[in-house]
Amino acid sequence: MWSRSKRFVSVLVIALLAFGALAVGQVYDRNETLYVSGAAWGPPNDWNPFITWSKANTTGTIGYLYETLFMYDPLNDEFIPFLAESGEWVSDTAYEITIRDGVMWTDGTPLTAEDVAFTMNLGKDYAALWFAPMWNYVINVVAVGDVVRFDFTEEPLYQEFDNNLYNIPIVPKHIWDSKSEADITGGANENPIGSGAYMYETHSSDRNVWLRNDNWWGNDVFGVPAPKRIVDARFSSNSVALGSVIKGDVDLSNNFLPGIATLAEKGYVKTYFEGAPFMQAANTAVLFLNTTKKPMDDAAFRRALAYAINVDDIVRVAYANLVSAASPTGLLPSLAKYDDQAVIDELGWTYDPTEAARILADAGYVDVDGDGYVEAPDGSAIALEVTCPFGWTDWMESIAVISDSAKAVGINIEDVTPDYGSWNTALTNQTFDMTLNNWANMSNTPWTLYNLLFNHPIKEIMGSGNFGAYDNQELFDLVDALAAVPTTDLAGMQAVCSDIQRIMLSEVPMIPLWYNGLWAQYSDSVWTNWPVDGSNDPARLPTTWSGYWQLGGLLTLIELELANP
Amino acid sequence: MRRYFGRKLLIYLVTFFLAVTIDWMIPRFMPGNPVQNMLARASVRPEAAEAMYGYYTKAFGLDVPVWKQYLNFWVALFHGDLGTSVYLFPQPVSKVLRESIPYDIFLLLPAILLSWWAGNKFGAFAARTKRLDNTLLPIGYILTATPYMWLGILLAWAFGVVFDIFPIAGAYSFSMQPHWSWAFVWDVLKHWFLPFASLFLVGFGGWAIGMRNMIIYELEADYSHYMEALGAPRKLVRKYAFRNAILPQVTGLALQLGVIVAGALVTEVVFSYPGIGYLLLAAIQNQDYFLIQGCFLFIITGVLLANFLIDIVYVIVDPRIRRGMVGE
Amino acid sequence: MTPTTKNAKKKRNEFVYFALRNTKLKVGAVVVITFLIVAMLGTLFTEFEPREYVGPMSEAPSSEYWFGTTFFGQDVFTQFVVGLRATFMVGAIGGGLATLIGMLIGFVAGYRGGAVDESLNVVTNIVLVVPSFAILIIIAAYLEVRGLMMESIFIGLTAWPWTARAIRAQTLSLKSREFVDMARISGMKPMRIIFTEIAPNMMSYLVMAFILQFGGSILIAATLDFIGLGPTTGISLGLMMQNAVNWGALQLGLWWWFIPPGAAIAAIVGALYIMNVGLDEVFNPKLREM
């Protein structure tokens, strides 16, 4: 009896000791780990770099893991060779890329021109891949030694091609050529093999953990990324993220967080700019107007609305000064050189309710029945809705401001917030009146924005832009012409942009309102040397957003330093 | 007794059949097209979008006639195949659920059982004990009338923000990988405590009040007075009263399950606890047919099973049914 | 005058006497009525609209903004009183509808018995066992634009089963009473018997069922609103809590934003429950405190 319980106790003690010993190595060292959040809301679900709509859920799939041929520095408008050592147009219809030497996949196989050619050819074989349309003007892509040669038809879309150069992720041929179509276009690609600075380590429903690749080719070229481990935390709500940033549990947060302006001024967090708008501009929030419905089919009405909206109130109230008003052309500050200031001076608008009322009256919109709201020139009542998805709180506040300021000049617009799904259906099927959208990222070319705003041809379902189905062939031709201008031809691009802007500003098919920020707030408690205004050589963007690693996000990691080494 | 179980079983089967049918039906007739929504975010050229649309409609099995989709649904169900999540594409729904279910069990089972047990004990103790009764009554009513999320918010604010003792989000720290160590177990418990406490407290108030009222009914019943008149000790009378009062409380547990599930759902939302409730909300916001179905199916099956278990317990506790004296 | 109605009248006088002496009932009623008055007259004390940006952002309660302001500078008090109104509406409509359906099904099942009872019983059991909240969520998600009325009706449609069950049991016991037999022999139609003979004799029961359903509906509505599946227009107490949480009220310490709405719900529903116990004591002499 005695010995039995003794034995039991000793087994228990050993078990406890073993239990304790296991702990080592599975609790991350704070000084080796970078905690980031805000790039994605959902759980990490796939590591397939070709699933564009969900790659946001596993931020880093492109950037940490898979790499692109070039990086693009949006602040200095410069391409930085990445997997490519160099690239050049050898003729108007042929482009050659020399692949960098000594790049390895993490399984030890070298990355070669064969891998690049293989990746490009996937777009030819599978129409469901996002870059398949490139093959409308590409004839073939072949690897010759360490060179990849692209041959084009007579009319290459230079703008789109350049954009693809820093957006198509290169995958290893020796692994991907045995995959089925379903796996390539939609497989989860678990335990991925990449070539990048970080490797997949583990994940759970609220995190995605990346481990530094100590054999990364870029260590000698760009430098060694500082954090050994990156924990990408998926918070469920703004408030949780906010708490973690204040406490310093999260080093870099890329959520839109309310109240950051106050916290930044008090010194709790750092932001890119010291004062308003605190954040860099990342994309343009545009009010799309459904031109298939009355009275949005009337350019005068649309113009009056553009004058009526109090963007300053959106900036001040809905965003507490975290954003800035957009140029009427919608182009981001980084693309300002494509703005034709003369056109803007002549046709642009600012908030001016008196002017709005004047345009309305001139065009025959008057309050006939005395209810305080104008009626259409044919006497019919106007009752419109401005929408955004329920739960997108900053936008919900913004459309409330839009509604208020429209009512102030006599246009009856209610703000309505349907669920995301029905909002989305209304958006693509033109069953909305007016709604907000911002689906064009920072880019090397104004064509990216214009491709969203003036997407064509007009179809029953407008799934990729031009949601208000604004139909203007002259404008569409100009957008197509812009796509075909070589990216080196600045004057040529500016000329086409000027023509586009002249139509856009006189017809007002949609109203660019403000620049959504590249939301970024960082804590200095563990990691320092974050990008701040004035240190852009080369551009380092303080962001973990998908699609921004190759815009300078990766360089941010390399420049980080420990606060207390 | 066989008749009793037969009837119960029949009702559960019919309910299950109907629930599965509703489950299949409702999301399918919801406004919006999930494939289109999914692709809208891809922001690709129209040519590619069309090809992708056709491809994924087929991949999700939405291209066959509706009746066939229904049959396929049942067949797949019995193979444990709940389809592919749209929101978490390309993960299978069954896998997504499997990752969440342990958290629900870990949170709900202790919260339900402990609050029921403690509430009953305490309610019985407090009944007709003047001073306790006067404090218990208001507190219990306030607790049971408190919206789950509000109690959660208060706890999170007080203990998570003001005093900063407990974490208020997630199931374990971001600095840990799941493994067996005291540090990790402690971490998990710390994350579990506040959501557990909000579920426990609301439940506790309800059960304590229920029991207190039941005991008073029983103590005022003729048999109690008769026993007292015969000179039975007060303790014995209370014991009998408790035995009789516990029966409606068992039934009450079955009736309350739906409410508790709803409470767990919002509690998980407040504390970002990665259970089914949290998942269901995300699924609805993203119009994920298959994930909504999976969550709903899990909730229905769970509640049905729990009801069935409670029926069995009831038979064990209630001597009348055990001896086959009543049919229902 | 039949013996039944005489009986009922005597009972009513007795009820009023004990009701006025019951502390629980009085306390509960005072709390509920106070909130009701605030809901009805509160807007007289505020010149703001619930979503209007009225002044300084995130300001603590003051003489000007009684409950402080939200993160955007909306007046919390205004939102609170307007939200209270929605709360009472959901309680009245949702709770009323649930009681009504439960009553009808309970009466018919209990009085008719046999196959009618059997089939209604199966329906009741099914609705009882399916977690109504899960159904409500799906319905809520199904409707693109939701109103307060719609929400109340759907809550009513899913909350009735336990009332039906309880009323069925009561009807069963009343059915075999003498006065019901008398009515039947005298050739009264079943529906008339139910409403003239049975219902008045369980008035106390119906009132209590309604009170419980009232409180239950308020809680369900608040829960739906909190997860963003409540009305898509207007303001409610649940929505206030959701906004507060979403906008970091906890982390930024804006307690005046999230405490009033939850406290009001807890107070109203708690008071209703306490009223219910009070009523129980009034109706059931055995339960009165010694």
Image (cartoon, grey):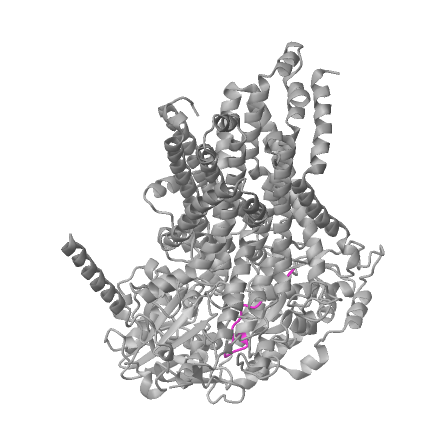
Placement of A272 over or under C281, stated as above or below: below
For the C terminus of chain A, which image quadrant?
Answer: bottom left
Q: In this view, does A101 lie above or below A297?
A: below
Rendered residue at 22%/63% (across/down): A13
The boundaries of the magenta stretch are: A434-447
**Which residue occupies the foreground of this view, B201 or A75?**
B201
Where residue A438 appears, as percent x and y from the top left, is 56, 68
User: Per the image, is A440 magenta?
Assistant: yes
Of A477 and A366, which appears nearest the observer?
A366
In which quadrant of the rendered view does residue A120 lie? bottom left
Residue placed furthest toward the front: B231
Left/right of residue C139 with respect to residue A197 in the rendered view: right
- Tell me the quarter of the picture where residue A194 sits: bottom left
What is the x, y in percent for residue A134? 42, 70
- The image quarter in which residue B69 lies: top left
Q: As displayed, is residue C184 above or below residue A505? A: above
Comparing C241 with A503, the one in front is: C241
Foreground: A481 or A271?
A271
Q: Residue at x 36, y 63 (%)?
A: B186
Name the magenta segment's main secondary structure. loop
Left or right of residue A146: residue C45: right
Total labels drawn: 0
Point out residue C20 in the picture as x, y percentages from the top left corner: 72, 37
C246 left or right, relative to A236:
right
Rendered residue at 37%/34% (across/down)? B312
Q: Is residue B29 visible?
A: no
Q: In this view, does A519 lie to the left or right of A295?
A: left
Please check the rendered image and state whether residue B315 is part of the magenta-colored stretch, yes or no. Answer: no
From this view, report whether residue B46 is shown above or below residue A445.
above
Residue A516 appearing in the image: yes
